[in-house]
Amino acid sequence: MNTTNPETPVVSDAVGSNRWYLSTAPIVRALVHLCVPMAAAMIVGAVYNVINAGFIGSQHDATLLAAITFGTPLLGLVMAIGGVFGVGGGALISRLLGASEAEPGKAGEIKHVSSFALWGSVIAGAVFGGIGLLALHPLVSVLGADANAVPATSAYVAVMLVFVPVLAAAFCLEQLVRAEGAARQVMIGLIASTIASVVFDVLFILVFHWGVVGVALSMGLANLGVVVYFAVWLHRNSEHVSLAPRWFTLAPRVLKPLFGVGVGELLQSAFLIVTSLVLNNLAVAYGDTALAAMGVAVRIAQVPEFLVMGVTLGVLPLLAYSYGKGDRNRLKSALRASAITVGGIVLIFSVGVFLFRDQVFATFVADPSVLVIGVTILTAQLVAMIVNGFTGLLTSLFQATGRSAAAIVMSMAQGVLFIPIVLVGNLWFGLAGIIWSLTVSEGLVFVIGVVMWLASRRAIDRGLAEGTPERAEEALEGAEA
């Protein structure tokens, strides 16, 4: 229970409530509440990606798998649009909730943050989707599709662009729900969406034979359901969040801290897109077999990767709330427990999948040429996963504490490092150099993250020691300094 200020609503801190898990629950219980549902949802999503690849693979057309691979960078950018508003807004909401324990008036800002986040993501998504449809053919060329894959890639991308506002809003709302510690509700929404996607896939791919158009349509409709679910839940259950347009604001006190964190998401996705484009354009020289192998390997590796992401994403609201509250011990305990959890997951799953990589990959692809390349790609990704989990945890810490500069550096580092590494790798080692270049660059990003964490520890401690208003607006003050 909150004893700092008697004006704080008692119901918010009731034992077992979402607010209680953020504020005073034992760390292990808080992590289980926040991370297990997120990890479960991420794993279900990863399993769906594997099933989806199986549906497409059943059509016995490598260009269809290649089309989805080509469209992956674009999907990443769409998620980034939602991430700019959702991650930035969610981190600020959690900090304001923590700050409101000492100054209840801070909670009044949350409705402005949430309204701007949602409608900002919808507007930005509509603009991006419209521009993409007008420039569809040049866009497909930029994505790296060769002559054989252009028709399927164009169809896949066109349908995806139509649903960009929906996809961006769904991702944004997910972050806003998580910001209040409602990880279980996020899990329910995402798993329900995955089940709906499977049903739609069966209908659109296996019954109607719409191929990649069915994949994109399935994804769009499932995310539309997510938007409805999260919006209704927030309206009925959230004490402070409001999605009403009347609370939409362009006030600097909202925009600066939100974009201070959110822009890191955009830059990260932008550089990941550049990375994928370079990767696709270099790999296309080795034929559709290499691209198909990449597509399947990515989906297999996502199962353990998404489990780790469930932890790194799930802990972010707890870190942000603790920082806004000024609870140094809780922040450090949450960070330490999360790091131990990530390390255990990485060790168990990377070793397990690595030992049975041939059997796992052969389950989804029968073509021997695709199998050989895919196993190599999967191995490289599993090695990268060892550092990816800790890199993600450091990024969550930077976002939670409003360290926008550090978050931006983390976002840019991989792309900046990857391009020269992959060009040299392709020149010296061919396809193997391309495959392992991403692993090398991600290892270097982790080293950069550790250095920045060590350099920012004193600044984070100062933020924890300052008054609540300063902590809640840490990112804003940093921008004005």
Image: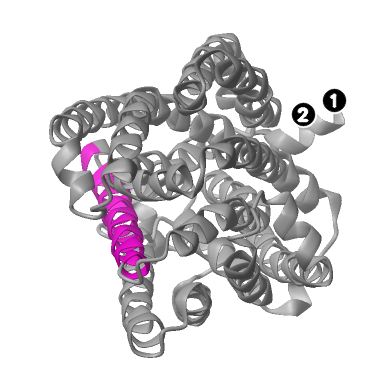
Report if residue 388 is visible in the image: yes
* Residue 308 found in image quarter: top left
Alpha-carbon distance for marks 1 and 2? 5 Å
Stretch of the chain drawn in magenta: 28-57
Along the horizontal axis of the image, is 257 left or right of 38? right
Residue 43: where, in percent of width, then height? 28, 54
Along the horizontal axis of the image, is 48 left or right of 81? left
* Residue 345 found in image quarter: top left
- Looking at the image, is 373 positioned above or below residue 69? above
Residue under label 1: 481
- Looking at the image, is 38 positioned above or below residue 136? above
Residue 440: where, in percent of width, then height? 48, 17
Report if residue 175 is visible in the image: no
- Looking at the image, is 451 positioned above or below residue 187? above
Residue 296: where, in percent of width, then height? 36, 50
Q: What element carries label 1?
A: loop
CB atoms at circles 1 and 2 under 8 Å apart?
yes
Q: Is residue 55 magenta?
A: yes
Query: 401 or 445: nearer the eye?
Result: 445
Mark 2 residue crowding within 10 angstroms, few (<14) / some (14–19) / many (20+): some
Circle 1: residue type: Ala
* Residue 72 found in image quarter: bottom right
Query: 289 or 316: nearer the eye?
Result: 289
Mark 1 residue crowding within 10 angstroms, few (<14) / some (14–19) / many (20+): few
Circle 2: residue type: Gly
The residue located at (48%, 27%) in the rendering is: 431
Residue 430: where, in percent of width, then height? 52, 22
Residue under label 2: 478
Along the horizontal axis of the image, is 366 left or right of 211? left
The residue located at (63%, 69%) in the rendering is: 151
Q: Does the magenta stretch include residue 479?
A: no
